[in-house]
Amino acid sequence: MKTYLDCIPCFLRQTLETARVSTRDERKIREALDKVCLIIPKISFDAPPPEIGREIYKIISRVTGVEDPYYNIKKEHTRYLLALYPDIKKRIASSSDPLLSAIKFAIAGNIIDFGPNSDFDIEKEIEKALHYNFAIFDYTEFKKALQNSHNILYLADNAGETVVDRILIEEIGKPIKYAVKGRPIINDATLENARDAGIHRIAEIISTGCDAPGTILKYCSKDFLKIYEDANMIISKGQGNYEALSGENRPIFFLLMAKCPIIARDLGVENGDIIFKKGGLVG
Amino acid sequence: MKTYLDCIPCFLRQTLETARVSTRDERKIREALDKVCLIIPKISFDAPPPEIGREIYKIISRVTGVEDPYYNIKKEHTRYLLALYPDIKKRIASSSDPLLSAIKFAIAGNIIDFGPNSDFDIEKEIEKALHYNFAIFDYTEFKKALQNSHNILYLADNAGETVVDRILIEEIGKPIKYAVKGRPIINDATLENARDAGIHRIAEIISTGCDAPGTILKYCSKDFLKIYEDANMIISKGQGNYEALSGENRPIFFLLMAKCPIIARDLGVENGDIIFKKGGLVG
């Protein structure tokens, strides 16, 4: 997905929010905002938003000296979701379609986000999950692809969401490689966050090598790119991964919530809609 | 009121919105956004937001070649409010305190705004007006000041709102100078908009000479400044005028809706609150 004009005010809003999580020094926050303003005229709108997000979060890190401003918040969200784990497992087990129920909870976890829309209520979203009406629902294709796949790559999104990813991976019950970001970026899951969620017990945790808030292939490691090319099914979580990979011709299933009007328009859905969409090469 | 860090993303949002009203040429909209980004690092946060707003709208005008993008919208809002005029007059006449009721409608009209929050419903606001709970309510002081005043200056805000300003001026029943902006800026009322609302029938319409979305004294004409200094009571409408004049030691009454969290914090109220506040030298 390309970057839209509407992304510009949003980039500045995200800068302000993350700089404030990083420091209380108003001069540094101002410096971060000013520096982000100065790169805006240079950015290419052909790049997906996470590519610009990557530049922005680098600026904030450099200005504030804080590498991982969401460290504690990520830990807290993981603990919070782990406490809900037994209850979610029970609800899935007693549902008529446990795989679909697990998918719904995995998308509900996508509400956790400090990028496009940081005003969220996890508990409320988990409660709503089983009643989701999908705006795009490629479940039949997903089940078919799952049956034929032995080499599944799962692209993580945010920390905390990792716990419901784990539940979905447990429900799928096949060997899966679970790919997290190469370094801390917003509240995206890192190796540590994936381990905290217990993913290592049921999947192989790998790094994309990418330091953007979305899996941008040109910033991924060679090792990851080989895994990406070899995978015969890819499950992609969240908006950042959709933005980065929506143009790719790979067998990708995108599971996400549309958390801003721009991605909603790109997908042809409403803001807030629940998306379960097969990518270009599926089916 | 000074400019806050939170104003920066909002400046970009306003740029995008006004540039879109001015042109459909995406390259020009991008150019306006880029140019606004480049001035952000140079602005002083000691200046009130309308001072920066003035620079921003000048950039948009220069880039798009459109001097008055809200011209038709201002005409339309004036027509809309004029159609409600007889009904509002009736409701005021049959209320227990017609002056206070007129003040409430005059503030309800302040919902019309394409600056801080352009998502509004005039009809709904007019319906709510008589039930307003003021967060700040200096009505007793206002009535006292009114009794002793023979030289009243009324600072207009937006077009359309001019109609309910007229109703309040009719209710006050004293000679009033009604000051509009010196040139089109966002949807702020101009001489033409004030005449369209029929203000010339009941007050003297004057220009502040100022081309900012708020009465910033250093950009006002000498003629206006004399009237401002001579006035023994000033009624100031809207957020932009509050931002520009909140630090002034003049007998000002601010009538406004707090339309963003920043001004709400500055006033010590909640976003959306209804404000009827006396300024420094009153009482």
Image (cartoon, coloured by chain):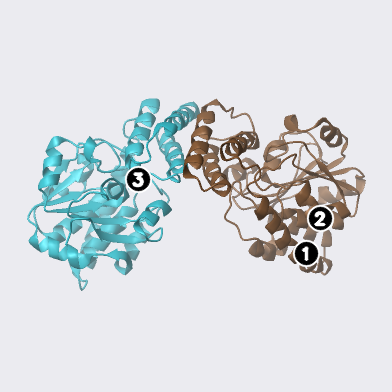
Chain colours: A brown, B cyan
Question: Which subunit holds the residue at mark 1?
Answer: A
Crowding near the residue tagged with mark 1, few <14, some 14–19, many ≥20 C-alpha atoms within 10 Å: some
- Would you say residue A276 is visible in this rendering? yes
Kindly report the distance in space between the C-alpha atoms of the residues bearing marks 3 and 2. 49 Å
Which one is earlier in the sequence, the residue at label 2 or at label 1? Answer: 1
The amino acid type of the residue labelled 2 equals: Arg
| Residue on which the image places disc 1 | A85
The quadrant in which the C terminus of chain A is found is top right
Same-subunit check for callouts 3 and 2? no
The answer to whether mark 2 and mark 1 are in CB contact below 8 A is yes
Label 2: chain letter: A
Q: Secondary structure at mark 2?
A: helix
Question: Is residue B157 found left or right of A4 in the rendered image?
Answer: left
Q: Quadrant of residue A153?
A: top right
Q: Secondary structure at mark 1?
A: helix
Q: Please state the horizontal and vertical placement of residue B205, each as a whole percent of the image.
A: 14, 44
**Hey, which quadrant is residue B72 in on the image?**
top left
Q: Residues within 10 Å of mark 2 (few under 14, many from 20)?
A: many
According to the picture, the residue beneath numbered tag 3 turns out to be B2
Q: A235 or A281: nearer the eye?
A: A235
Residue annotated with mark 2: A166
Quadrant for the N terminus of chain A in the image = top right
How far across and down, in percent of the image, does residue B217 sit? 22, 40
Separation of residues labelled 2 and 1 (CA atoms): 10 Å
Residue A203's x, y, as percent? 87, 50
Residue type of the residue flagged with mark 1: Tyr
Query: Position of B270 compared to B187: left or right?
Result: right
Gap between marks 1 and 3 measured at Cα: 48 Å
